């Protein structure tokens, strides 16, 4: 499973780490400074840069491992385009050829083609990955074909076969690119009366096949295959490299290259991981699901600093939910954030004792679960540029039951998105420059701290009343999630000013608390945009935030709504007062939870958490649209580059940040151009 919402991070926080806590040195505090997260908007999608600070501290051996896994992930990326649509790769090649050879193309036409190309990269085809609908360029076919002709005259390589002519190819592709009503949906699970699910889905897992045709048809490797009709008969085409007596299958070159990179990576891995990587390489060659199973069993039991998910994994794109979409995600454990989580877990009892609620609801023992936080170093195929925020694998239930599963939170992806949005918000919605300055200084850190305290100290805290039987959730029912999310948020907010944070080495000063409160009040204001229609919040986290800030506004002098030039701001005018209000509502919510008080939960959530001021909403929505805030986002990943010594040996793998989607995508396009023997394993000498 992959998760796209931060809301589910808690679900993932079950993979307890056994390793001891390595406390961060005080004075080695990382502040965000001027780091750039927001890169651009492409229609309604925000593009952000993800960072991976831990990479530079790796040993050369670890970097080499990561480097070959990085290569393996790029080697397979075309497969997902092809799975999404039978012409997606052909269209992408044409788009890239135009974008790389633009001299002489009308500027306006070029910028529309570039926008469409970016959307194509973002979605790995001409279909939106979120809603499965086709999107089209904002320019005409005539303009498009003219631009292509100019690019051709500029010497562009469209990747055509020898007997193909550009004009003919374009005119054939025309409806696929320009006609929104032609093959309108990629994956159509509800095609309507009398319509066939497969025939009405443009996705390329089946060709000329209907659901009825498949009755009684036996597939051998359902995850990594495509079903077609050949000479009037159904045939299963398997994705595999072949070799050792196995016939090569679809995408054999890509999979062989990927397998070779996995084997090279294995040379730099510890023995257990080396075995795992070789098992995956074997599966890429045989395409046999039994080999995939063997690999998964070994993988799930192998906990490593650098890890890769690579293969045919999730089945959401297949209307029948059987075919796996190709993806690769390369991860590096984020020691700093994982150890921050551990530090909070270790000190959970301290925070429990300082909680504002009655002693009878305090725990005397806490076993806070901690998940691994990782940097996503790369996501391709179904995992990029649109990146999941959390991953829990393997999917096979039998393996999960017998051997467990691995959970990660892609911390750098979650953070990039959050900070990018917050930065845009700050310009428009912060009430003072002082607030902006503080946000600049602590922006990323307050996010890390809040997530850590929310997940580790918050949800794990408190205990139910001695005489309450069973789980409070059974009593509080539909109000439970809002109540529990609010409780976790409040615990985080309550502790933001605790000097313990400085002592633990996770915050440079208690000033962090001010930035945390400023941003929280602002978030409650900007959240109004999430209810474009109607007058109430539905989502639990949104209800929780609204309830907290409304409570503080109405019952304390902590936060004031202020109007300047007709614009509304939420200003924290008194941090102590806000802290007091937070303590007050937190003790109330704890008591409600502890006693399983349904009526109490309903009353307080209905009073403060649900209804919004629609006039204020209209204002916020308008301002949000004007500054281009977005709830859809994609990631530009780090770039890895080998550094060679005079003797041709690799002396380092450098990490850098492309800061541009187009640059990264074109890097990938040319990644294997004439670089094949450069890093041949035999020639790489580690010094
Ligand atoms: Zn939560």
Image (spheres, rainbow, N blue to C red):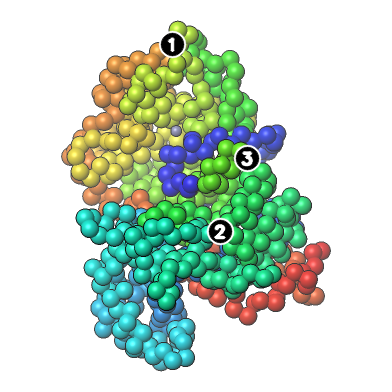
Q: In the rendered view, would you say 523 is above or below 159?
A: above
Q: Nearer the viewer, residue 646 or 250?
A: 250
Q: Locate residue 417 relative to residue 502 in the image: left or right.
A: left
Pointer 1 or 2: first along the chain: 2
Whether residue 521 is visible: no
Residue 341, percent from left and from top: 58, 35
Q: Judging from the image, what secondary structure is the residue with disc 1 in?
A: loop
User: Residue at 45% across / 39% down in the picture?
Assistant: 8
Q: Which residue is mark 2?
A: 311
Q: Judging from the image, what secondary structure is the residue with disc 3 in?
A: helix
Rounded to the nearest whole Å, what is the CA distance between mark 1 and mark 3?
Answer: 35 Å
Q: Nearer the viewer, residue 129 or 462?
A: 129
Whether the residues at callouts 2 and 3 have beta carbons within 8 Å, the answer is: no
Quarter of the rendered structure image containing ligand 1: top left
User: Residue at 28% across / 36% down in the picture?
Assistant: 538
Residue 204, percent from left and from top: 40, 66
Q: Residues within 10 Å of mark 1 (few under 14, many from 20)?
A: few
Q: Which residue is mark 3?
A: 403
Pointer 1 or 3: first along the chain: 3
Q: Judging from the image, what secondary structure is the residue with disc 2 in?
A: strand
Q: Quadrant of residue 540?
A: top left
Rounded to the nearest whole Å, what is the CA distance between mark 2 and mark 3?
Answer: 20 Å
Q: Nearer the viewer, residue 474 or 416?
A: 474
Q: Which residue is mark 1?
A: 468
């Amino acid at each position: 499973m992959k998760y796209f919402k931060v809301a589910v991070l808690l679900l993932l926080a079950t993979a307890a780490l056994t390793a001891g806590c390595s406390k961060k040195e005080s004075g080695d505090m990382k502040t965000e400074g001027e780091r750039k997260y927001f890169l651009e908007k492409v229609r309604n999608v925000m593009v952000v840069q993800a960072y991976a600070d831990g990479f530079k501290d790796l040993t050369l051996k670890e970097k080499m491992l990561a480097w070959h896994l990085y290569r393996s992930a790029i080697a397979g990326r075309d497969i997902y385009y092809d799975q999404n649509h039978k012409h997606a790769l052909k269209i992408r090649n044409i788009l890239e050829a135009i974008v790389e050879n633009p001299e002489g193309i009308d500027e306006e036409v070029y910028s529309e083609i570039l926008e469409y190309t970016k959307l194509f990269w973002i979605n790995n085809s001409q279909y939106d990955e979120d809603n499965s609908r086709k999107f089209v360029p904002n320019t005409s076919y005539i303009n498009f074909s003219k631009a292509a002709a100019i690019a051709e005259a500029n010497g562009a390589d469209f990747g055509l076969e020898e007997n193909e002519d550009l004009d003919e190819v374009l005119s054939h592709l025309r409806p696929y690119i320009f006609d929104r009503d032609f093959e309108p949906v990629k994956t159509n699970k509800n095609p309507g009366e009398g319509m066939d699910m497969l025939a009405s889905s443009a996705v390329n897992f089946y060709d000329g096949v209907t659901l009825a045709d498949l009755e009684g048809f036996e597939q051998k490797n359902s995850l990594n295959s495509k079903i077609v009709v050949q000479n009037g008969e159904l045939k299963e085409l398997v994705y595999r490299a072949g070799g050792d007596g196995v016939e090569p299958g679809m995408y054999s070159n890509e999979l062989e290259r990927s397998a070779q990179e996995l084997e090279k990576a294995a040379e730099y891995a510890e023995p257990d991981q080396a075995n795992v990587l070789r098992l995956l390489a074997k599966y890429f060659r045989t395409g046999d699901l039994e080999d995939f199973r063997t690999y998964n069993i070994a993988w799930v039991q192998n906990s490593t600093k650098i890890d890769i998910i690579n293969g045919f994994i999730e089945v959401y794109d297949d209307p029948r939910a059987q075919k796996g979409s190709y993806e690769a995600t390369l991860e590096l454990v984020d020691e700093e954030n994982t150890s921050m989580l551990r530090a909070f877990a270790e000190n959970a009892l301290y925070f429990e004792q300082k909680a504002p609620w009655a002693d009878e609801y305090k725990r005397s023992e806490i076993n806070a679960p901690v998940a691994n936080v990782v940097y996503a170093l790369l996501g391709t195929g179904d995992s990029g540029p649109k990146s999941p925020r959390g991953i829990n694998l393997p999917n096979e239930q039998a393996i999960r039951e017998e051997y467990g599963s691995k959970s990660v939170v892609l911390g750098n992806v979650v953070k990039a998105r959050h900070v990018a949005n917050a930065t845009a918000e700050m310009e428009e919605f912060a009430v003072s420059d002082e607030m902006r300055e503080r946000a600049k200084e602590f922006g990323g850190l307050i996010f890390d701290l809040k997530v850590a305290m929310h997940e580790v100290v918050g949800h794990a805290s408190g205990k139910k009343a001695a005489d309450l039987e069973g789980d409070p959730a059974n009593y509080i029912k539909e109000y439970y999630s809002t109540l529990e999310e609010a409780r976790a948020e409040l615990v985080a907010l309550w502790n933001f000013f605790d000097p313990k944070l400085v002592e633990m080495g996770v915050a440079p000063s208690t000033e962090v608390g001010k930035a945390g409160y400023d941003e929280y009040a602002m978030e409650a204001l900007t959240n109004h945009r999430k209810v474009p229609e109607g007058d109430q919040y539905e989502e639990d986290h949104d209800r929780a935030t609204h309830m907290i800030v409304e409570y503080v506004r109405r019952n304390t002098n902590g936060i004031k709504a202020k109007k300047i030039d007709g614009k509304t701001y939420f200003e924290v005018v008194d941090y102590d007062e806000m802290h007091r209000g937070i303590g007050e509502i937190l003790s109330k919510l704890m008591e409600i939870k502890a006693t399983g008080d349904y009526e109490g939960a309903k009353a307080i959530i209905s009073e403060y958490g649900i209804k919004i001021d629609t006039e204020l909403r209209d204002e916020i929505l308008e301002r949000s649209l004007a500054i281009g805030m977005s709830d859809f986002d994609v990631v530009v990943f780090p770039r890895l580059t080998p550094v060679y010594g005079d003797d041709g040996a690799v002396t380092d793998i450098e990490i850098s940040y492309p800061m541009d989607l187009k640059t990264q995508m074109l890097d990938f396009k040319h990644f294997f151009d004439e670089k094949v023997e450069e890093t041949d394993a035999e020639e790489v000498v580690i010094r």
